[in-house]
Amino acid sequence: MTSIPSSSLSPTAAAQQRMVKLFDTLAPTEGSTHACLDGVRLMRSNRPLPRMPVMYEPSIVIVCQGRKRGYLGGKTFHYDAQQYLVMSVPLPFECETDATPDEPFLAISIRVDLGVVAELLLMLNDTRGAAHDEPRGIYSTPLDPTLGDTVQRLLEALVSPLDARILGPGIVREICYRVLTGEQGDAIRAALTHQHHFGRIAKALRRIHADYEGDLDVDLLAREAGMSVAVFHAQFKTVTATSPMQYVKTTRLHHARLLMVQDGLNAGAAAARVGYESASQFSREFKRLFGRSPVDEVRRVRTVIETPSLRSVTSQRPFVTAA
């Protein structure tokens, strides 16, 4: 992006230009760069990326430049510069990225730490009531000036490892506070406190990700959620836009792709590791999800994402994501 003198910019535009400069220092290469602060990643893409399946962990994603489109069920989520996305539960969906070398896509991702959220909720207990509407799993919202200023301060702190270690956790905590007290806060609150059916589904999702290679079925998941099978199935699809067993299958396939790309496992070994008994069934379902055979998909990932970025992107256990 062409630099314009700060004196001729609006405060919002000047703040965005400052963020872009900080990204050039912190994440100069494409892909996903782990910051020197646990749970914080910087994402950069200098070129458009086609629509592809991804799975994100519960997180807050703030876009500083460029735009993405996410697809979940029949809904499309747009998150452009000066917007943030909150995923309160792990969701498999599809996304595509608009970016150019002159205006790369730049975003910061902050993992939702439920311990920090729980502590904040205790402090907010006297000032916020229960959520009135059934929350969703994903929201996209404009970035208000206060939250934008906090994000910029986090980026500035990340430039110095000492500042990141001493000041970073407090700034991340402030970002969580701003989100919790904003219009998206109900989803994370419900996921933590098990309000409504949403909280029970969030518990089932955590169970799936903790034991995705195990012998999971709808009866077991519904029983652990304290719901009838019919209600569990309907509410699960409301939150994730997919059925429980399709979600389990998608989770396994994402993990298998990670194992093949990062650890070099072949398709048969990866299939067995994530709970498939039939390698042929694994290959069919893998191609149905990713549009390519396991061998072709691994080759594509290694071609599209350069090696330094690939190591960063594929180290995000247990979720496979794309910048």
Image (cartoon, rainbow, N blue to C red):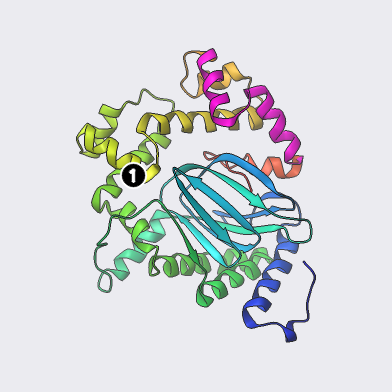
Which quarter of the figure has residue 295? top right
Identity of the residue drawn at 20% across and 39% down: 226
Task: Please indicate whether residue 282 sits to the left or right of residue 98 in the image.
Answer: left
Task: Please indicate whether residue 2 sits to the left or right of residue 10 in the image.
Answer: right
- Residue 183 vs 12, above or below: the answer is above
Which residue is label 1 attached to? 238
User: Magenta stretch?
Assistant: 280-306
- Residue 22 vs 92, above or below: the answer is below
Residue at far front of view: 74
Task: Please indicate whether residue 226 sits to the left or right of residue 166 in the image.
Answer: left
Q: Position of residue 163 (x, y in %)?
A: 62, 69
Magenta portion: prevailing SS class: helix
Task: Please indicate whether residue 280 sits to the left or right of residue 176 in the image.
Answer: right
Which quarter of the figure has residue 40? bottom right
Which quarter of the figure has residue 257? top right
**Quarter of the image that includes the N terminus:** bottom right
**Helix or strand or loop: what does disc 1 sit on?**
helix
Identity of the residue drawn at 54% across and 30% down: 289
